[in-house]
Amino acid sequence: MIMPYYAVPTGIAKEQTGMSYNQEIVTGLLRGKLGFQGVVNSDTGISTGMPWGVETLTVKERYLKAFEAGVDRMGGDATPELVVQLVKEQKLTEARVDESARRILRIHFALGLFENPYVNPEEAARTVRNKEFEQKAGVAQRKSIVLLKNRDNVLPLKPGVKMYVEGINPAVAARHGYVSTANPEKADVCIARVAARADGFMAGRSTRPIELTLGAEQLTPLLALARKCPLVTVLYLERPRVVPELAQESAALLATFGVSDEALFDVLTGASAPSGKLPFEMPSSMEAVRTQLEDLPHDSRNPLFPIGFGLTYRTSSN
């Protein structure tokens, strides 16, 4: 399967529409010139969000436009009745539907999903919760954590430190021998896990541009917390974020990509030294994001943290 991408292929195709709506890209380039025979799956939610170049069309008309371009499946949508309506209205032929169905079903048959649709119980028992697999996953989690800032060597946490935590199970802290308090002003250190919420991308199928800054509802309480005690901010990053204020005010800043509290505390306490590196830039501002080139990697102006950045406790600094 291939997903064409949301973007408009400016300077490549004559028609200025998103790639999944662009016949010149999907049928002409991908299928014709490059010889791709598999399934073309549109990018997720393009019928209601980010319908670049077809904003004036109805959702049903967007479906038709994508199918005419050569798309086989509308990603993230669950409205097959629109396909039925298009066929009944004779705007889409059954032969065209069969063409895409054939491509999709070929994959299912190749995977054996019709002949063997059920899980093998013996194989499941061997692999699910396999201790060796869990141990390797735990190591991978710990190695993935990136230390971005460590002012005055606030990390690793000193034994017996009194902490205030948000977004972390206090029982995990207790198992590591640390004391939790409900009052941040009485804490030696505050630790907050932050899952930065999306704004403008797949958020209610919004058509607004992607916003990488934290919303005020997240940022304001964190900055207030930093004024009460040294703040260790643990960011979950599903994409780069613009967090200059938070980086400035935090005593320590870590980037994570989906880790357990246990894995996190092993790094916070020094049981595992941080060794992860950023897989992308952390831009310094949204202006820098807007002026960088969309088709080039890590080229924003004066990034807050460059790609590949990552400290450890032997090299941590302000």
Image (spheres, rainbow, N blue to C red):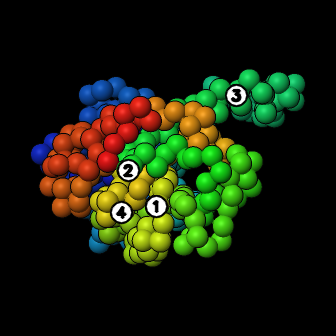
User: Which residue position is annotated with label 2?
Assistant: 151
Residue depicted at x 71% and y 48%: 177
Q: How far separated are the C-alphas under marks 2 and 4?
A: 10 Å
Q: Position of residue 165 (x, y in %)?
A: 60, 62
Q: Position of residue 280 (x, y in %)?
A: 33, 41
Mark 3 vs mark 2, foreground winner is: 2
User: Which residue position is annotated with label 4?
Assistant: 249
Query: With 247 as the anchor, is 12 left or right in this view?
Result: left
Mark 1 vs mark 4, foreground winner is: 1
Q: Which amino acid does label 3 sit on?
A: Gln
Query: With 216 as the anchor, is 299 left or right in this view?
Result: left
Q: Are marks 3 and 1 in contact (CB under 8 Å)?
A: no
Q: What element carries label 3?
A: helix
Q: Do the residues labelled 1 and 4 touch (CB within 8 Å)?
A: no
Residue depicted at x 32% and y 48%: 318
Question: Which sits earlier in the primary sequence, circle 2 or circle 4?
Answer: 2
User: Which residue position is annotated with label 1?
Assistant: 230
User: Which residue position is annotated with label 3?
Assistant: 135
Q: Where is residue 101 in the image (x, y as percent from the top left)?
A: 56, 42
Residue depicted at x 44% and y 40%: 146
Q: Is residue 154 above or below residue 124?
A: below
Question: Which sits earlier in the primary sequence, circle 3 or circle 1?
Answer: 3
Q: Is residue 91 visible?
A: no
Q: Is mark 2 on a helix, strand or loop?
A: helix
Q: How far separated are the C-alphas under marks 2 and 1?
A: 9 Å
Question: Which sits earlier in the primary sequence, circle 4 or circle 3?
Answer: 3
Crowdedness near tag 3: few (<14), some (14–19) or many (≥20) residues, C-alpha within 10 Å: few
Q: How far separated are the C-alphas under marks 1 and 4?
A: 9 Å
Q: What residue type is labelled 1?
A: Pro
Residue depicted at x 24% and y 39%: 297
